């Protein structure tokens, strides 16, 4: 149980393109999803917290207009990197928290490797 | 300020050589401490949750313990397949459920 699916797993696109990444909880409902960015050999950096039906809460230093987050249902959140540039290239990972849990762990997707040319 | 520090940064062990990874934390009220394993190019895989000092959890060759200031992940008789990055995260009581991650320990177990 507690499976989180992230799609696509890998994307290469040209500078200036917008890229959408999907995060789905497959066997549970997630009121809260989290989006992280990870650089090589570094830990996960939280970008934003996404709550179903409301606006995302962004961490300090993360551009809201660059990284658009939508959490339209209890099983789906999307991250859109708008007008992507090479510096946006990174490993993006989502996680989801079970709505029925008290203090259950976050469950992570397998990440999306984004490369901007 | 809430903070999590993991040590060592990297660790190389011979197969069968037991060791411990450390996660020290400073948080204004601990809701939970979480251990994850991350393989290259993958998302973190959940291992353990610890809630209060004195608590211990075990799974195969791994055992996690918790005090008021730190947590240890003990690896007994490791195998090469235990090679991964081990991440520690804490959740503070202060309202949200977000994690504060440590920088991780990269473990390599040699056959």
Image (tube, rainbow, N blue to C red):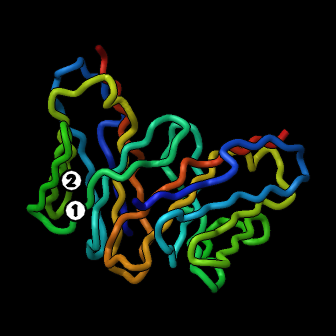
Residue under the image location 30 percent in, 41 percent down: B7
Circle 1 packing at 10 Å, graded few (<14), some (14-19), many (20+), is: many
Contact between labelled residues 2 and 1, with CB atoms less than 8 Å apart: yes
Q: Residue at x 51, y 61 (%)?
A: A95
Q: Bin the neighbour count of mark 2 within 10 Å (Cα to Cα): few under 14, some 14-19, many 20 and up.
A: many
Q: Circle 2 marks a residue in which chain?
A: B
Q: Does the rendering let one see residue B5? A: yes
Seen at 28% across and 68% down, the residue is B32
Q: Chain of mark 1?
A: B
Residue found at the far top of this picture: B111
- Work out whether residue A59 can be spotted: no
Q: How many marks?
A: 2
Same subunit under labels 1 and 2? yes
Q: Quadrant of the N terminus of chain B?
A: bottom left
Q: From the viewer's perspective, is B76 left or right of A114?
A: left
Quarter-wise, where is residue B4 in the image?
bottom left
What distance separates the C-alpha of mark 1 from that of mark 2? 9 Å
Q: Is residue A50 left or right of residue B21?
A: right
State the SS at label 1. strand
In the rendering, at what x and y percent does residue A11 appear?
76, 43
Q: Quadrant of residue B61?
A: top left
- Give A16 or A32, whichever is nearer the viewer: A32
Residue A26 position (above or below residue A58): above
- Residue B71's tag is 2
Residue A24 horizontal side relative to residue B58, left or right: right
Q: Which residue is mark 1?
A: B50
Of the image marks 1 and 2, the number of the one nearer the N terminus: 1
Q: Quadrant of residue B59?
A: top left
Q: Position of residue B72 (x, y in %)?
A: 19, 48
Q: As rendered, which of A115 and A88 lies closer to the eye?
A: A115
Residue A80 in the image, given as x and y percentages of width and height: 76, 63
């Amino acid at each position: 149980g507690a499976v989180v699916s992230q799609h696509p797993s890998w994307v290469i696109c040209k500078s200036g393109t917008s890229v959408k990444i999907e995060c789905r909880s497959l066997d549970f409902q997630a009121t809260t999803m989290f989006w992280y960015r990870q650089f090589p050999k570094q830990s996960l950096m939280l970008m934003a917290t996404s709550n179903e039906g409301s606006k995302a809460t962004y961490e300090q230093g993360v551009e809201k207009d660059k990284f658009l987050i939508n959490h339209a249902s209890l099983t789906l959140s999307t991250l859109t990197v708008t007008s992507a540039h090479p510096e946006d290239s990174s490993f993006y990972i989502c996680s989801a928290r079970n709505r029925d849990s008290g203090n259950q762990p976050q469950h992570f997707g397998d990440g999306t490797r984004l490369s901007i040319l | 300020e809430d903070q999590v520090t993991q040590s060592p940064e990297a660790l190389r062990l011979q197969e069968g050589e037991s060791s411990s990874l450390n996660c020290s934390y400073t948080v204004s009220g601990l809701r939970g401490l979480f251990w994850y394993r991350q393989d290259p190019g993958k998302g973190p895989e959940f291992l353990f949750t610890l809630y209060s000092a004195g608590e211990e959890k075990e799974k195969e060759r791994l055992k996690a313990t918790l005090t008021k200031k730190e947590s240890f992940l003990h690896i007994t008789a490791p195998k090469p397949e235990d090679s991964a990055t081990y991440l520690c995260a804490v959740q503070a009581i202060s309202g949200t459920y977000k994690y504060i991650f440590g920088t991780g320990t990269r473990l390599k177990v040699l056959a």
